[in-house]
Image: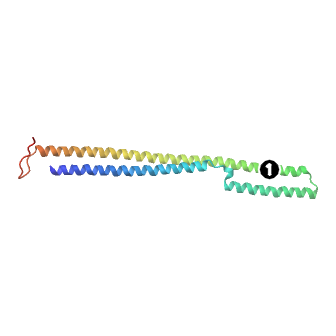
Amino acid sequence: MIGSLIGSAIGLIGTGVGLAQASKAAKKAKENIEDQQRANQNWYDRLYNEDATQRADAQRLLTLTQENFKKRNKAAQGAAAVAGGTEESVAAEKAANAQALADATSRIAAAGEARKDAIEEQYMATQNDLNNQLNQTEQQKAQAIAQATGALGSAAMNAGTGVDEFQGGSPLPNQKPLIVR
């Protein structure tokens, strides 16, 4: 009977320690997931709000295109001067080059919109995954608490039964019966 009391007490202590450790692990897991959510949000904010025409690759493309068109405009002016071309032909060449530059800028902007869609899709998928992980962590924490609460109740009941048996049961060998007043 004393053994059952000791066993129940150890069970209570063990369950309490286990509950504390499970709670600590769940809290750490939740913090890690929340950190990942913040990092994902920062990534999304940074990339989604980026101007596609200001990216380094787009700027390089636009700069090379402009330089190429400047060379073509100079060549058209030189050819017009040598061959006796009209100013209208030079102006038409310049207009065609300006239109080509505007088209390139439009294509960059359209590609930027497609890129934003892909970023948003990836962001949402990552957020959904992290939210599912967070929900699992909370469910595991709730299950651990329920199991620990049940174990605490069972250990307490066993301790109570052991006390009842000890008080009302037969005396231990070489012991006088316990008289409760």
Q: Which residue is mark 1?
A: 98
| Residue at screen point 38% across, 52% down | 25
Residue 68 lies left or right of residue 113; in this view the side is: right
In the image, farthest residue toward the front = 181
Q: Position of residue 62 (x, y in %)?
A: 73, 54
Colouring: rainbow
Residue 34 lies left or right of residue 59; in this view the side is: left
| Residue at screen point 89% across, 51% down | 89
Quarter of the image for the C terminus: give it.
Answer: top left
Q: Please tell me which residue lies in front, 103 or 152.
A: 152
In the image, farthest residue toward the top = 181
Q: Position of residue 113 (x, y in %)?
A: 65, 46
Q: Position of residue 107 (x, y in %)?
A: 71, 49
Q: Position of residue 72 (x, y in %)?
A: 83, 57
Tell how many labels.
1
| Residue at screen point 30% across, 44% down | 149
In the image, farthest residue toward the right = 84
Q: Amino acid at mark 1?
A: Ala
Q: Residues within 10 Å of mark 1 (few under 14, many from 20)?
A: some
In the rendered image, which quarter is residue 77 located in? bottom right
Q: Please tell me which residue lies in front, 55 or 128.
A: 55
Residue 120 lies left or right of residue 92; in this view the side is: left
User: Secondary structure beneath disc 1?
Assistant: helix
In the rendered image, which quarter is residue 78 located in? bottom right
